Amino acid sequence: MIGGNPGAVQGAFRALADPTRRDILVFLSRRDMTIGEVAGRFDITRAAVKKHLTILEEGALISVHPSGRERINRLEPLGLKTVADWLSYFNRFWDERLRSLHDAIEEEERQKDD
């Protein structure tokens, strides 16, 4: 199987499917934020931001930690590693294909020179 736990990969890709959630991850890569801080960066309701954060948490891409009355959202690099590991399989695939193409072009050039 490619990339480990299929449920983890599926949850992470579900979370990454939405551009707003991808933007939230970029903000959280810079610093941990409360729901209010995240919501302040978007022209959507706080409830909509909360739903996005919940999906990101379910996908293991963020974690939420209580701090007094606030809930602090934090990027989880290991969740992103799950996605990166899955995608790395295809990097190897393309490396092999491109290497084969390179070899074929070199062989064709050698034949033209003969």
Image: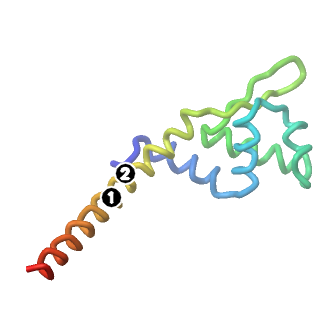
In the image, taking residue 38 as reference, residue 100 lies left or right, namely: left
> In the orientation shown, which residue stands out farthest toward the left?
114
Label 1: state its secondary structure. Answer: helix
Where is residue 84 drawn, in percent x and y? 48, 45
| Residue under the image location 28 percent in, 59 percent down | 96
- Tag 1 and tag 2, C-beta contact below 8 Å: yes
Where is residue 78 drawn, in percent x and y? 54, 33
What residue is disc 2 on?
89
Where is residue 97 drawn, in percent x and y? 29, 64
Q: CA distance from mark 1 to mark 2?
A: 6 Å
| Residue under the image location 40 percent in, 45 percent down | 3
In the rendered image of this protein, does residue 37 appear above or below residue 45? Answer: above
Q: Nearer the viewer, residue 32 or 8?
A: 32
Rendered-image quadrant of the C terminus: bottom left
In the image, taking residue 16 as reference, residue 93 lies left or right, namely: left
> In the orientation shown, which residue stands out farthest toward the top?
68
In the rendered image of this protein, does residue 103 appear above or below residue 68? Answer: below
The image quadrant of residue 80 is top right
| Residue under the image location 52 percent in, 50 percent down | 10
Where is residue 89 drawn, in percent x and y? 37, 51
What is the number of callouts on the image? 2
Amino acid, disc 1: Phe
